[in-house]
Image (cartoon, rainbow, N blue to C red):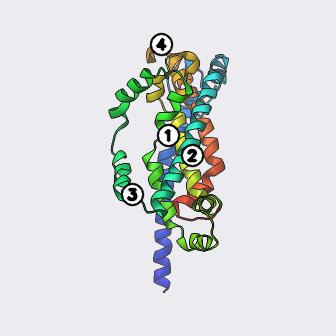
Amino acid sequence: MQTYRRGSSFTDRALFIAVALLAIIWIAPIIWVVGLSFKPNEVLMRTTGGIAAPPFTLKNYTDILASSSVFGWMLNSAIVAIGQTVLTLVIASLAGYGFARTNFLGRNALFVIVLAALAVPEQAIIVPLHTMFAMFDLHNTYVALIVPRVAFPFGVLLMTQYFRAISPEIEEAALLDRASRFKIFWRIVLPLSVPAQVTLGIYTFLHAWNDYFWPLVSATRPEMYTLTIGLASMQTNFAQTEGIGFLMAQAVFAGLPVLILYLFFQRYIVSAVAGGGSK
């Protein structure tokens, strides 16, 4: 018994060390980017080492904020990301509940089609999407930036699997009390799925906030740029940028809102990944 405990303790320590090393490897580039963002560009022209040594400066960030368009681009990103997140949650929840709890003609075939959509790369449909929105003159609008990303097969799959894991006995009791299917979904099932909802919401928000490809195609007017496109437009090419520190400050500035959002909702993500239904 004592040997088992010693072996178990050694295994736990080895796993902890392995996880710690992986965490350091993962976070090292982030620390490097943040460190460079506080270094003067004239210093970085000589060397990009010694990020912990002075001098330091906030000029790279003040240069970003000095642009009058930055906050407009940030507002566009917020509108697009929030719009995509809300609509994706509504559609994925309704579709997931339908697949998980209702029987209708062609359900299995339709679910297979949803799964097959996961294998379709974004680049394969970019031309039809551009043509369709150009036909209706919707480019350079929030509709064009939001709607194409609302059909999210992974979200439907996630919510379907989560609803299937919820015991149907709760719903059967409500059905005996003559509650409607929508009332059961809204009052009982949906509150139990909060961890999955938050996980899907954060994933969708993160993807929408960092999306570059489709906004680059659809938003051609500076006033409709999202933050990723706007910050990229402040550069011409790498050799003509304001400096490496300025580039790193842009990366930190664009990623900070998502990091803050994750810190607030990380417990829901852990709960959803663990398969728990508690809030």
Q: Secondary structure at mark 1?
A: loop
In this view, 223 is above or below 37: above
Checking the image for residue 107, the label placed there is 3
Q: Which residue is mark 4?
A: 240
Return the disc, 2 or 1, that comes first in the chain's sequence. 1
Q: Is residue 194 left or right of residue 203?
A: right
Mark 2 and mark 1: Cα distance apart in space? 14 Å
Which x, y percent locates residue 70?
Answer: 62, 21
Q: Which residue is mark 2?
A: 202
Mark 4 and mark 1: Cα distance apart in space? 37 Å
Cβ atoms under marks 4 and 1 closer than 8 Å:
no
In this view, 5 is above or below 179: below
Cβ atoms under marks 3 and 4 closer than 8 Å:
no
Local packing at callout 4 (Cα closer than 10 Å; few below 14, some 14-19, many 20+) is few
Q: Secondary structure at mark 4?
A: helix
Residue at point 51%, 42% (across, down): 28
Q: Amino acid at mark 2?
A: Ile
Mark 2 and mark 4: Cα distance apart in space? 35 Å
Q: Which residue is mark 1?
A: 150
Of circles 4 and 1, the one toward us is: 1
Q: Secondary structure at mark 3?
A: helix
Residue at point 56%, 65% (across, down): 276
Of circles 2 and 4, the one toward us is: 2
Q: From this viewpoint, is residue 218 visible?
A: yes
Could you say which quadrant of the image residue 126 lies in?
A: top left
Residue at point 64%, 22% (across, down): 72
